[in-house]
Amino acid sequence: MLAMRIHEFGPSDRLKPEDLETPEPGPGEMLVRTHAAGVNPVDYKIRAGEFPPVGEDKLPLVPGGEVSGVVDAVGEGVESFNAGATVHAMVPPGRGGYATHVIVRPNEAAAIPEGMSWEEAASLPLAGLTAWQGLYEHGEMHSGQRVLIHGGAGGVGHLAVQIAKSAGCEVFTTARADEDGEMLERLGADRVIDYREENFEEIATDLDLVLDTIGGDTQKRSLACLTKGGRLVGTLGGPDEDTVKKHGVTATAFMTQPNGTQLEEMGRAFSQGTLRTNVSQTFPLEEAAKAQDTLENQHVQGKIALTVR
């Protein structure tokens, strides 16, 4: 199989095509022939050696945390999917989606809903599960709440805006209003705050929940936006306990986990027309380095996907 692999951490030129032996599915595993793979910020952080859970002991490594494709073969004990099924899945670092084939476990996968393209399907698992788990599992979101989503135009953010709106929340989001405002309002944002010209803490007040995909100073400033007992959920770590207690709120940092059941739920939302993945750019698998550079260095609306077929 063809895979894009790194042997050492560093810039994008470390990502090179290699011919590797196609893996065989073991018990409880499926071999998926990849049609598309999503590109996420964690991919270039892993490549650069800036993602602590993945150290040099994991090298060489094929990046890529989300894929779509066709089940080529199933191992012993797999009953939920058969060969020929079209699936998408989040896969953990190491098994890697930047390849023509990938091993997937059934509980990581869901059937691709009718009408969803390969690129859309590959761009939903990691980003969508991050939004879903951040809002529902860690944020305990429910109808009627006031929610702020930072980085609303990004891969996680634009999905989180839709999920929060569908849950019956009032949705605030930070973005570049002139470039992203129309898209975000179409997706359900009640107020798009231009972080370059406006102070979000003066506009998004008395919040029940903040989903922070930015970190740093943005995260610290967000604490003051929360009502007493409100929640801040971060994808890039959380603030110190003393600061959190001073504001009378709670803060949680989390790592997204594969979950086929939740992915299936998002597929139903797609079929109902309440969730869309915005794939703004695609690149061939062999141009994965260019795709990562684009995501890291340019303003990207939604997601970038690699086409593998």
Image (cartoon, helix red, strand yellow):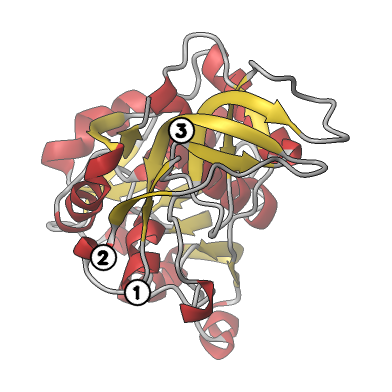
Structural distance between the alpha carbons of marks 1 and 2: 7 Å
Q: The disc labelled 1 sits on which kind of residue? A: Glu
Q: Within 10 Å of the Cα at label 1, are there few (<14), some (14-19), or many (20+) other Cα atoms?
A: some
Instruction: Identify the residue under disc 1.
Output: 8
The one of 150 and 62 positioned closer to us in this rendering: 62
Residue 266 in the image: above or below residue 156: above
For numbered disc 2, what is the local secondary structure?
A: helix
Quadrant for the C terminus, please.
top left
Q: Could you tell which of marks 1 and 3 lies nearer the N-terminus?
A: 1
Identify the residue at horizontal 32%, vertical 46% (top origin): 154
At x 40% / y 60%, what residue is drawn?
Answer: 42
Residue 179 place in picture, x, y as percent: 13, 38
Seen as rendered, the residue at the extreme bottom is 242
Please say if 9 is above or below 201. Answer: below
Residue kind at label 2, given as amino acid type: Arg
Q: Residue 305: where, in percent of width, then height?
A: 33, 36
Residue located 69% across and 19% down the image: 83
Q: Nearer the viewer, residue 243 or 112?
A: 112
Q: Residue at x 34, y 47 (%)?
A: 173
For marks 1 and 2 on the same chain, the one whose residue lies earlier in the sequence: 1
Quarter of the image for residue 74 reads top right
Residues marked 1 and 2 touching at CB (< 8 Å) = yes
Q: Nearer the viewer, mark 1 or mark 3?
A: 1
Please tell me the numbered disc located at residue 122: 3
Above or below: residue 173 compared with residue 277: below
Q: Which mark is residue 14?
A: 2
Label 3 neighbourhood size at 10 Å, few (<14), some (14-19), many (20+)?
A: many
> Secondary structure beneath disc 1?
loop
Residue 192: assigned label: none
